Amino acid sequence: MALIKTTIDGREVQVERDRWAIDVAREMGIDIPTLCHHPALEPYGACRLCVVEVTKGKWTWLTTSCDLPIREGLNIRTDTPAVIAARKMAIELLWAQAPDAVEVQALAKQLGMEKPRFAARAEAGKCILCGLCVRVCKAVLGQPAVGFSRRGVERDIGAPFDKPSDTCIGCGACVAVCPTGHITSVEDGPLWRLNTSKTEAELELAKCPECGRRFAPVKQIEFIRKTLSDKPERAVLDQICPACRKARTAAGLSESSRERRICLEK
């Protein structure tokens, strides 16, 4: 693939066309803050913290770097006064949206801010409405178990009608990508619980037939079985816990090694 030239913070680099500017900058050791960007998902530009200043020809503009594709001849600056001002405004708005999010507070401190000018919204907590949970849920299931609801200052994320979703399989992907810890999960005896400010889901945990340990939601195993319907040998393995699966695999490898050794000795 042909390389194109672009400039970031005064340093000219040659990179592949259409790569995201934030990824290129980070490879160069340039720190660009963000809370809504994840390498496994398409960019969304929700938090607005990764804003940069771009110049091409006689035109200069501010834009988010997570969804800025690299083009020939761009001059990208990540630390201009306009960029810093835009980031401060974005962090103030996020602070009012999620005053309990320590990640937001830490970024505000880095920008030299002690407190926001805006009052916290009603029922504020840790959710910054970044949409990562919605996007990863859709990527895994095709039909997301959570989504956006309402508009304006009442905008929120949760299951439809704020009730436990029948679509959720308990994969925990939303917990893994949540940047502020708003979404949490816990294993409580025979149940796996997912918690947000609006919704609590409960799913039964499957019991390993070999050791008796509860290890994964039944609906998750059923989803995996359906996905691997053309690979029955994998579907069988997904019914036992990871520890027993490893032990079975190790035993199989040891047996294979022993058989090979016997064959060589003959």
Image (tube, grey):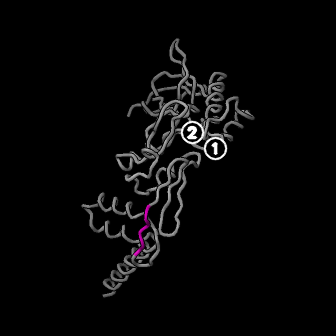
Q: Is residue 30 visible?
A: no
Q: Which region of the structure is painted magenta?
A: 203-208
- The Cα–Cα distance between marks 2 and 1, rounded to whole angstroms, is 8 Å
Q: Residue at x 44, y 61 (%)?
A: 203
Residue 175 x/y as whole percent = 51, 52
Instruction: Give the labeled residue for mark 2.
Output: 128
Q: Is residue 259 visible?
A: yes
Q: Secondary structure at mark 2?
A: loop
Q: Which mark is residue 101?
A: 1
Q: Is residue 103 above or below residue 195?
A: above
Q: State the residue lying farthest toward the bottom.
A: 266
Residue 183 x/y as whole percent = 54, 50
Question: Which amino acid, by three-letter code, is at mark 2?
Answer: Ile
Which quarter of the figure is the C terminus placed in? bottom left
Question: Which amino acid, by three-letter code, is at mark 1?
Answer: Ala
Does the residue at mark 2 contact the one at mark 1 (Cβ under 8 Å)? yes
Sort mark 2 into few (<14), some (14-19) or many (20+) by Cα contacts within 10 Å. many
Left or right of residue 169, residue 57 in this image:
right
Residue 117 x/y as whole percent = 70, 29
Q: Is residue 255 above or below residue 126?
A: below
Assess whether residue 148 is covered by the magenta stretch: no
Q: In which image quadrant can residue 10 be found?
A: top right
Foreground of the two, 4 or 118: 118
